[in-house]
Amino acid sequence: MTEPLIKIQGLYKLFGENPKQVMPRVKAGESKDKILAETGHTLGLKDINLEIQQGEIYVIMGLSGSGKSTLIRHFNRLIDPTEGVISIEGTDVMKLSSKELQDFRRHKMSMVFQRFGLMPHRSVIENVAYGLTVQGVPKEQRLAKAQEWLDTVGLNGYEQQYPSQLSGGQQQRVGLARALSTDAEILLMDEAFSALDPLIRSEMQDQLIELQETLHKTIIFITHDLDEALRIGDKIAILKDGEVVQQGTPDDILLNPATDYVEAFVKDVNRARALTVETVMRPPARRITADTIGEALQQMKKIKGDYAYHVTEDGYQGIVTQDSLEQASKANADEQFETCEYQDVPTISPDAAIESVITDSLASDFSLPVVDDDGNLKGELTRKSVAEVFAEPEESEVDADSNKEALVSK
Amino acid sequence: MADSSWLERFPQMSRADLTVIRKSLDGAYRNFSREYGEAIESFFEPLLQFLVWFEKLLITTPWWLVLIVCAGLVYAASRSWKLVIGSVVSLLLVGYFGMWEDMMRTMSIITVCTMLAIALGIPIGIVMARSNRTQAIITPMLDVMQTLPAFVYLIPVVMLLGIGKIPGVIAVVIYGIPPVIRLTNLGIRLVDKEVLEAATAYGASTTQRLFGVQIPLAMPTIMAGINQTIMMALSMVVIASMIGVKGLGQPVLKSITNQYFTLGLLNGLAIVALAIIFDRVSQAYAKRTQAHLQGFKHD
Ligand SMILES: Nc1ncnc2c1ncn2[C@@H]1O[C@H](COP(=O)(O)OP(=O)(O)OP(=O)(O)O)[C@@H](O)[C@H]1O
Ligand SMILES: [Mg+2]
């Protein structure tokens, strides 16, 4: 594995008058509520360890008050930690002088804010160019650049408007364009889409994913919405009361929730939309590789069941049933396969969401063949595994429910 | 019982002690003013020169030229012909009733006092917004400045500098400066935290944050402070005339002692006219420069 771009080790944050004095209590494992009641200090973050690879979208999620904003503000040191190491590209951010920190913020990172954080007294184009203005880039150059990004996010024609004249979605596009215009390689997004209505929100998510395909930035994305996290994240870390309770790929989290807390989150997710075929398909057991019908029939008899996938050097060909093979072999067992022998069954891609193959799966009498872009048979999707996706994750129901109630009442 | 007499009469300090305190304080201050009076006076000398020069300028310039310049300034600030005409008519009326020269004197001192109050008040307000501790120190001082009767702080000023323009200016500035300071401080503190955070996140330096974000966003509040300061300065005109500041205030003072009703009324109305002009023009200016808040476009 390559060296991570961002590495956070043993990060603690205590809000209050005298954090250093209260630290021993935190280390001793006292709870957030107890520390607040007895010392008046709020435990913001506790022993955070993260590694973020170059070019990935790293999602940090958790409920309100779990410390997401606090954590993301440590990356560019809008908040200083009480203890811990934050290193980016091998540089310890805590050791930067204020001048170096300024430079670092100008060139290495940019940020998109939950409530947009646009400057109401500057026009849209001046807002987009703000990062460059701060850097001292000459006016013509920075306006040209800003114009480019404004066009990219689809706000051509709004240059001279003021932020207050735009809708929420448009304002956040301005925020995104501002963040992109400095060409910083790390993008921090604090609940960037949370203030938008669902439709605009998924539009913005699509736009972000699309942009990321060409830009390959390292994005740290905060959200309290697991659907959003699963949709855009390459990796997800789940925060609770300032602690990371689980981190991993979206599928990891969906399929193996580490604690009841994560479980409660996962329960509400539309798993059929979040999971891909690849994660639930079975390895293709029934495959035949014969050239002639006679051979095929022999292979077929060894297989459990009465149909099989026919695979050649060129990849997947189609489904054949034992019945049709028997019929054909009566005529001529040495004959080559013909397309007419195949059953009419659609193939599905391993990257497709379960949701998109439900109808096909139910309509077909066979398990659907999973075939990748190169035509290779990767597996089969049984109707049973589709059904399992919709089943409740096995776990004592009562536990999960009471846990969720506790979350809601917080 | 003889011992409980303090229950009937307030147990006060003995007369002798009080006299000692008074004498020693007065003496100390007199010594101080004898020692440093001249130095302080020479410190204010340039300001005095400027005041005299400015007043002379306003008085010796032909009235129509002053009127034209005023009209031009009003237009530049407000871009409103209605305001220009209103101001010119009221200035003409004041002049017609024989108060032109006094009005020029008042205008000059008010202008200088407001400038001084702004030049001192805004930086103090900025410093105050920087830390809670400075705010905690400055706020009670401002409270005292606004509530202490003007005569009380006029005494030491007059003792130090005698009667004249400078003590007048000091008195007016002390009385008028609190609103600019308070509202600059408030305006900066009310700047949206996330906007300021955004500036920091993009690597803005302290100066870039101050002039690029905090002051522009605090401007409507600061302008309200400036407006109040002008009004308070104008309301001090009569009191300042008691320590020798010439202008519209002196005839009012004369009218009080001699019971000249009409004279007092006319001069009083002239002060009101000035106040209204200053107020409307500064407000129109503030509103015009904050176009983005109304969602209008700049031109
Ligand atoms: N400046 C501060 N002083 C004291 N406590 C703070 C401060 N900032 C945050 N906290 C506390 O830290 C905890 C985490 O806050 P944070 O804002 O990071 O939550 P969040 O996960 O971003 O929530 P949300 O989804 O509502 O934005 C909260 O308990 C909050 O009270
Ligand atoms: Mg937050």
Image: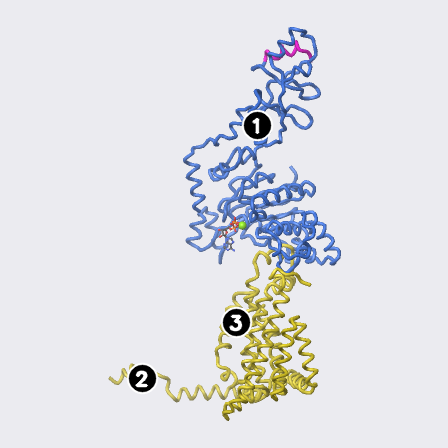
Chain colours: A blue, B yellow
Q: Which residue is mark 2?
A: B9
Q: CA distance from mark 1 to mark 3?
A: 73 Å
Q: CA distance from mark 2 to mark 3?
A: 38 Å
Find residue A359 and name its label: 1
Q: Ligand 1 near label 1 (Cβ, under 8 Å)? A: no
Magenta-colored stretch includes residue A334? no
Q: Position of residue B210 (x, y in %)?
A: 62, 64
- Report crowding for label 3: few under 14, some 14 to 19, many 20 or more residues within 10 A (C-alpha): some
- Report crowding for label 2: few under 14, some 14 to 19, many 20 or more residues within 10 A (C-alpha): few
Q: Residue at x 61, y 56 (%)?
A: A164
Chain ID for label 2? B
Numbered range of the magenta stretch: A291-302
Chain ID for label 3? B
- Residue B58 located left or right of residue A270: right
Q: Position of residue A357 (x, y in %)?
A: 59, 29
**Mark 1: amino acid:** Thr
Which callout, 2 or 3, points at the residue further toward the start of the chain?
2
> In the figure, A266 relative to B103: above or below?
above
Q: Are marks 1 and 2 in contact (CB under 8 Å)?
A: no
- Residue A96 located left or right of residue B176: right
> In the figure, A345 relative to B198: above or below?
above
Q: Ligand 1 near label 3 (Cβ, under 8 Å)? A: no
Q: Which residue is mark 3?
A: B138
**Tag 3's secondary structure?**
helix
Marks counted in the figure total 3
Chain ID for label 1? A
